[in-house]
Amino acid sequence: MKEPQKNELLQIIKFIYNHHKIYLKAIIITIILSVLVTFLLPKKYRSTGIIFPTFSNSLEDTYNNPMFGYDVEADRILQLLQSQEVQDSINAKFNLVNYYELDTLDERWRDELRKEFFANINFSKTPFMSIEISARTKDPQLSANIVNAIIGLIDPIRNRILKQNIIVAHNSISKEYRMQKNNLDSLVNLIKTMRDEYGNPAISLLANQEFNFDNKKMGNNTLLEEKIDKYLSQKVIDLMDRRVDVNQVREMIQLSQLHGIQAGTFIMVGYPGETEDDIFETVNHLKVSNPDIFTITVAYPIKGTPLYQEVEDRFIANLPWETSTDRDIDFKRTYSRKYYNYAVSMIVNEVNAYKAQQKGEVLKMSKAKLKAVIQRGRMYLAR
């Protein structure tokens, strides 16, 4: 060791030795004070509870997918635990005002109560997305009771909030329903009035000046009106005993659309007595009426209907009732079942091509038209 360093070390040791009594007294006093403070300060007992939020509020979803520690739900529960409602409930149940010896005559007593509450009752999210609830009081049983009471508040408060939200949503939907119902009732009354005044409203409304249905507003509908009789017949509709007029159906679709109401229609092919010309007339009907949506299927007999009675002796196979439905029943038709499946696909693609053409979507129209042509060829081969 170098001489200067050695001298410095000796000086430090000499200084400590000369003042060792003072250091010893300070250490002894500190120890005595620490012991006194430890015994004089009131003891506090900490109780802790852990909860794991579920992925869903539904009991069925929780049973089917028992996923715990969901991040978003954990944050929601934290907000709920820090709410004034939880504070008020715990303060009232355990009389924390008296426990913390607060003077309610002091205008700041509520702020002091809140400070004491969050100083001794804590809520935190763990790394495992669970919620830790802890309480510190002078009584271990009181700490445990506070934690259990807080846990018991979570579900009732959350369920009440969910019910309130459902009521708000229900009221909003009910209001919207009443508005739409009023609009529909007005339209029904309008149709009824026009039927009484003009006979067939479907034809009369197109020329009714009261509604200003000019060519610009109607688009191609005026032109289509001139083609209705040329393209459609009542033959299949009459065979089905629908008791409706095809022309009126078309015009009702167009009338609904003019009043901002989406219109849809249901189409069946393969009905007894239907010919290939009738199938192509169905395509033209969908183009003329141009509904917003349409569904299509191969006709099938439902037990108890005239169709079922008509074709019951022509069933291709007797299917077991316990494993089959009405849709599985097939009967001898003018053409094979494959033919009608191709016909359904042809109709869908023809209508899609027409709608795409109306929108100016050339590529989409070309694809749909090509598919329709292919299905026509398959129909021809499946005859």
Image: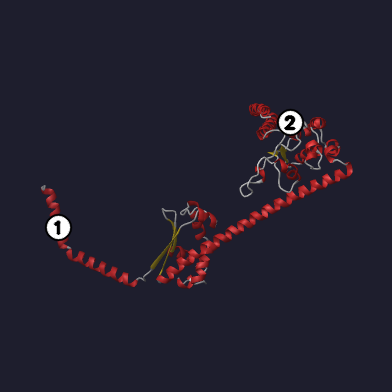
| Horizontal side, residue 314 vs residue 19: left or right | right
Give the SS element for disc 2.
helix
Give the residue displayed 10% in from the left and 48% down from the top: 3
Percent x, y for residue 52?
Answer: 46, 57
Measured in 3D between alpha carbons, the distance from the residue under mark 2 to the one under mark 1, in whole angstroms, is 118 Å
Furthest-right residue in view? 197
Whichever of callouts 2 and 1 sits on the residue coming sooner in the sequence is 1
Which residue is under mark 2? 276
Res 13 label: 1
Q: Nearer the viewer, residue 154 or 375?
A: 375
Q: Position of residue 68 (x, y in %)?
A: 46, 54
Specify few, some or many for label 1: CA neighbours under 10 Å numbering under 14, 14-19, or 20 or more.
Answer: few
* Viewer-proximal residue among 54 and 128: 54
Q: Tag 1, which secondary structure?
A: helix
Q: Which quadrant of the structure image shows residue 340? A: top right
Depth check: give the residue in front, 64 or 124: 64
Residue 146, relative to residue 293: is it above or below? below
Residue 296, image quadrant: top right
- Relative horizontal placement of residue 152, taking residue 208 as reference (left or right): left
Query: Visible in this render: residue 130?
Result: yes
Residue 61, compared with residue 91, is above or below; it is: above
Residue 279 on image: x %, y %? 73, 32
Q: Of the residues shown, which amino acid type is indicated by label 2?
A: Glu
98 vs 192, left or right, is left
Amino acid bearing label 1:
Ile
Colour scheme in use: secondary structure
Counting from the top left corner in percent of width and height, residue 292 is at 71, 38
Number of numbered markers: 2
Q: Quadrant of the C terminus?
A: top right
Viewer-nearest of labels 2 and 1? 2
Up/down of 210 relative to 95, above or below: above
| Res. 57 visible in picture | no
